[in-house]
Image (cartoon, rainbow, N blue to C red):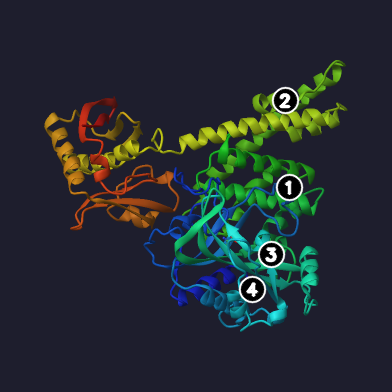
Amino acid sequence: MTSQEIRKRFLDFFAKRNHAILDSASLITADDPKATNATLFNTAGMQPLIPFLMGESHSKGSRLASSQKCVRTGDLEEVGDNTHATFFEMLGNWSLGDYFKEDAITWSWQFLTDKEEGLGLDPNRLYVTVFAGNDMVPKDTEAVEIWKQFIPEHRIYYRDSKDNWWTAGANSPAGPSTEMFYDLTGELGDLSAKEFEQADEDQKLVEIWNDVFMAYKLEGGEIVGELPQKNVDTGAGLERVAAVMQGTTNIFDTDLFVPLLDILKQHARNYNERHARIIADHIKTAVFLINDGVVISNTGRGYVLRRILRRAYNSLEAIECSEKIIPELIHAVVLMYKDLYFKDVDEKKIAIKIKIVATEMDKIVKIIQRGVKIFKKLKDDPNTIVTGKFLMDLEQTQGLPLSMSQKLAKKFGIIISDEAIEDCKKIRREHQELSRKGAEKKFKGGLAEDTPKIRALHTATHLMLAGLRKELGDDVHQKGSNITEERTRFDFTYDEKVSRDILDKVEDYVNNAISTNAKMGVQLMDKNEAKNSDVVGSFWEKYPDTVKVWTISDSEGNIYSRELCGGPHVDELLQIAEFGTFKIKKEESSSAGVRRIKAILEK
Ligand code: SER
């Protein structure tokens, strides 16, 4: 069965059971200061859904399913073994306080075993694990009772929280899980608990699906109570399911990788499977990241992109394959996922991606040339001692990563001590910590901090934009904003000075809305749906495919503002009134065609 067919069957199966099918969200996680996790990319299908699992209502209802693009870069060194890739897709179905264990397990079983609607896997090759319980959460005997309808009890195993507990971070929804395993060998038969563990360790079994019963709320890593609703969150890695369905034990032998490996086989002068897998995976990930707007840089997401391209380059070198092969690989990736993720990617856009990758590859070649010069010189100087700081400087100023320095040193017979390497890594960690903190600050979306006053000014700024558009027309768009405890500074598109008379009207609009004690509501919407409705937004391209829309409306249903935004905001508008009345203090030109307003809340 092709991967395309698997995806389709999965989504059709759940659509038939009244699930709304969501498009995959962007790989880039929302820059949300209240974000419950701090990962750079979506690493699981549930990640874009965290606010809804925590209790927000979803515009598409309480039953959802998707195939979500994910990138995990935690196990980079393991990429290229049988099961690890940085890019993968996760099939998932969700209940937001709708069905719970009975339906979730029944449907998982049906999809895995049913020949017509599902995968038609042999039930005798399936095993399941359930949560063994801990101090806070009981042993999941309920799941066992449900499973017993489908699978003999001796093929159900208890595992502890290391395996059968799922959470997306220290502040997130969480819960016990039940996992489904498939016998890759077809020979295992009934297994005792000990034999099951051994078979898993020997990779004779593969975990193909995980159903999480998300009913708990974590804060600071501790369970602080139950969620307002009991959710189901399931995840099945498409690549692994494809391997099972295509009769292989290895994700790289599936139709999701073979076309890329074939190209490399044709062009490599010294083909090596492991290196070829790394190239295939990394180029695929790079294409997806670039497509979702990641720009190469030395920090954050851009650094991940740079790093995987460098690794791809190293592997190209290892198999003696020219980087001229890259356009062909990029075309192949786009072709492979065309109908799903690259519908609007035409030749021109492919050319842009090729250019980005090629430019980066050129840079790498130059860096290596510089590195060769530096190490040649070191070789000629008998007094050289390579310190950690020196290695870090090479990384930062010459762009020469530690791994490359090590390689070059070896080539020129220069010894680098373990201590120097450790030192370099330590300095790097310190730098990363600093840039992480910097990034966290930046992610506040124009807000200096998240305080009650700043939230109040932020919500008032939404009202002000709505007021300006009402008075000056829909050509008024936000160009930028910066909010501190003292004031909101807001830039918007408009060609001429705005009269005091109009500013007064805008002030009235804001203060009137506040006096009705309108409520702030937030909703997640498809970006395109939001764009085509009455939602006001700027910088659409910076947002993921699923966006947060904040609506200010009173009890009679009058809408005062409806705007795309990451938050945070007040819950109700009287929280703004606590800080006084809204006043526009200043209106001036900011740049050509852009005006700037400074406004405050004053008692
Ligand atoms: N969140 C769980 C996982 O990623 C199930 O979707 O495995």
Marks 1/3: CA–CA distance? 21 Å
Marks 2/1: CA–CA distance? 26 Å
Dot 1 alpha-carbon crowd within 10 angstroms: few under 14, some 14 to 19, many 20 or more:
few
Marks 3/2: CA–CA distance? 40 Å
Residue 316, horizontal then vertical, whole percent: 74, 44
Q: Earlier in the sequence, mark 1 or mark 3?
A: 1
Q: Earlier in the sequence, mark 1 or mark 4?
A: 4
Marks 2/4: CA–CA distance? 49 Å
Dot 4 alpha-carbon crowd within 10 angstroms: few under 14, some 14 to 19, many 20 or more:
some
Q: Where is mark 2, residue-wise?
A: 370
Residue mark closest to the camera, 2 vs 1: 1
As shown in the figure, which amino acid type bears the numbered disc 3? Thr
Q: Where is mark 4, residue-wise?
A: 1
Question: What secondary structure is marked by label 1?
Answer: helix
Q: Earlier in the sequence, mark 2 or mark 1?
A: 1
Left or right for 8, reference 19 = right
Residue 599, horizontal then vertical, whole percent: 25, 31
As shown in the figure, which amino acid type bears the numbered disc 2? Arg
